[in-house]
Amino acid sequence: MLQLSVHLNYFVYQAPADMRKSFDGLSGLVRSHLGRDPMSRDVFVFFNRRATHVKVLHWEGDGFAVYHKRLERGAYEVPKPGVEGAELVSARTLQLILQGVVLATVKHRKRYVRAA
């Protein structure tokens, strides 16, 4: 199971991605289409056209790691597009997406948040 950290930023690439792409191809999408550095601490999430495959790209300090999952039935819910083409999502939201939860039905109770 993929471990997600609340200390990282997760960007969902909004266009359908070619799942044949691996480390270099996905890094190229991050650079050219998102205008971000794939070697940052950010995590980049890609879905195919039917949203049945997901790839997660992350730089781990000494090399790239790619997590790839194919669903046997059903599809992932891809968040709606953001302004810059990559929707920033929380680790909690990404975990819900990967578990197959319908995001519109999720309700979060109020919690204390310390002002910065």
Image (tube, grey):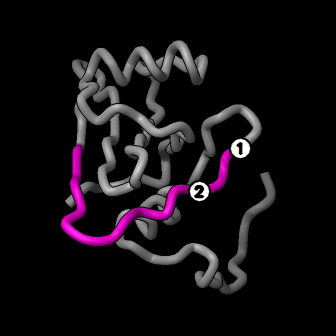
Q: Amino acid at mark 2?
A: Pro
What SS does tag 1 mark?
loop
Apparent side of residue 91 relative to residue 89 in the rendered image (left or right): left
Which residue lies at the image location 67% right of the left edge and 46% below the top edge? Answer: 81
Magenta residues (range): 68-81
10 or 51, which lies in front?
51
Residue labelled with disc 2: 79
Residue 73 is inside the magenta segment:
yes
**Is 64 located above or below residue 116 in the figure?**
above
Res 22 → quadrant = top left
Give the percent coordinates (x, y) of residue 78.
52, 56
**Is 83 located above or below residue 1 in the figure?**
above
Give the percent coordinates (x, y) of residue 10.
50, 44
What SS does tag 2 mark?
loop
108 or 16, which lies in front?
16
Which residue lies at the image location 52% right of the left edge and 64% below the top edge? Answer: 93
Give the percent coordinates (x, y) of residue 6.
48, 54
* Residue count near mark 2 (Cα–Cα under 10 Å), binned few <14, some 14–19, many ≥20: some
Q: Amino acid at mark 1?
A: Gly
**Is 92 located above or below residue 40 in the figure?**
below
Residue labelled with disc 1: 82
Give the overall secondary structure of the magenta segment: loop
Res 62 → quadrant = top left
Q: Which mark is residue 105?
A: none
